[in-house]
Image: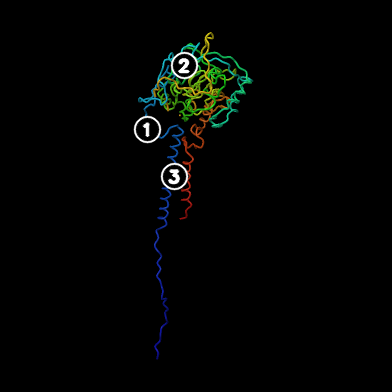
Amino acid sequence: MAGRQGPSIGIRPNLELRVKPSTPPPDDTHRSLRWILLAKAAAGVALTFVFAGGWYLRAEGVTLGEYQNELKRGNEPRFTWRSVDRKHWQALGRAGGETFPVSVSEEKPELTDARESTSAGCATGMVRVKGKYRTELHGEATGEIERLQDSACTDWISKEFPARCRTFDAERIATEIAKLPTRPLDFCMDRFEYPNVLGQNPMIVVTFHEAEALCKKSKKRLCNENEWTFACEGEEVRPYPYGYTRDSTACVVDRNWRPFAEGALSPRDGAGARAELDRLWQAEPSGSRGSCKSPFGVYDMTGNVDEWTQSARSTGFASILKGGYWGPVRARCRPATRAHNEDFVAYQQGFRCCGEADASVPAPRPAPSSPTTPALTPPVAGGADGGAPAAVNPRPRGGGPTADLSTEWGSDDGDELEAIGRARVGPACAAHPGVLAFGGAPVAPAAAAGAVVLAAALVRRRRRPR
């Protein structure tokens, strides 16, 4: 008898034992991702500060080399300064034995007069200015000659701030001004900005009334704006004292605008004021640029420092600024800044004086318009490095720190006035379009992108499923 068999069991021949691999807990995975995201965020923050620092230095007008020199120098001054009457300041030279890159040796006014041969009928150190001054057809306040010049610009560098024209059509200007009336003028003007000595730096931090008093003390008077304009442009009504084509190397212009510290010049004779002036100063000794010369032989009429003049208008302030300074301003003969009262004072403001001419002495002939003016003949000694004014008592018309400056805006406004207006909303940002203000410091768009990377990384971390 067959034995009884139990139930059969089928065994799958290819049975594989599959073991699920062990995985780290979810927290470990998230921890690793967090470290990666934090590393990316740290890199973004680092890039932000690097770019922000670079744009800040640029806004301050400081190159990397200058910044390295500043670090080496620490708190040492860039210049040696002289206080005048405990109100005004004059840079005497570079600190540490350094010299200005473009400069001339100091010279007595008598020697300069003898070489220049433009002083006939004037006191020592002054230039004879005689000829026919072109006037506005419809009154002094219309600004039509400046608009005429603007319409003759054939190559604009920029129509926005700071508005600058590279080339004017000389023939068109000559044709248009021939229709305008003239007024004979005959007077004397200081060859250089006060103290009117070749090779010395202009004196700055001076109010309109103080300029008047200093001219009177020298037995002269403050120039009026028409005299200043005529001495700059000549009978041809040149846009620039040297001609019709803007030359950024002819005069001390177009240097980087450096934001000023509000209230740093009060008190004017304090160590803080001297330190602020030392940081901002970018002018050069008078006569350093031989080509920055008007048809009559007056130097530095555009650029270097602003110059107070007496207004020729019957309305508005008597205090008018002409010529611009070392910053990126229009720096032409016709424009003027009319927004500041007679007590306004700033780091870039100076002046020069005028006087009466001896009409019995024949006047020298003005220089022709086309030739390149040769440099001064005294031996080169070795001048400065490139704002809107820093006001001690600005008080623009209308009162208050946020007064609307546009009420003083005319066709002949100086570009530095716009810089002041923009400085009220952020000087570095105004001077450098495309820079964002972040905590009072300018930040480049590329730096802002770093912040965006950081924000995106954090958002990604929050949205990652656990």
Q: Disc 3 marks which residue?
A: 44
Give the Cα distance between marks 1 and 3: 26 Å
Q: Amino acid at mark 3?
A: Gly
- Nearer the observer: mark 3 or 2; the answer is 2
Q: Residue beneath label 2, please? A: 116
State the residue lying farthest toward the top: 360
Q: Which residue lies under the disc numbered 1?
A: 71
Q: Position of residue 308 (x, y in %)?
A: 51, 19
Q: Quadrant of residue 145?
A: top right
Between tags 1 and 2, which lies in front?
2
Residue 39 in picture, x, y percent from top left: 41, 48
Q: Which numbered disc, 1 or 2, marks the residue that appears first in the sequence?
A: 1
Q: Is residue 152 left or right of residue 449?
A: right
Q: Residue at x 35, y 32 (%)?
A: 72
Q: Do the numbered discs 3 and 2 sit on residues whose CB atoms are within 8 Å?
A: no
Nearer the observer: mark 1 or 3; the answer is 1
Identity of the amino acid at label 2?
A: Glu
Residue type, mark 1 in image: Leu
Which sits earlier in the primary sequence, circle 1 or circle 3? 3
Work out whether residue 61 or residue 87 is closer to the camera in this orientation and state it.
61
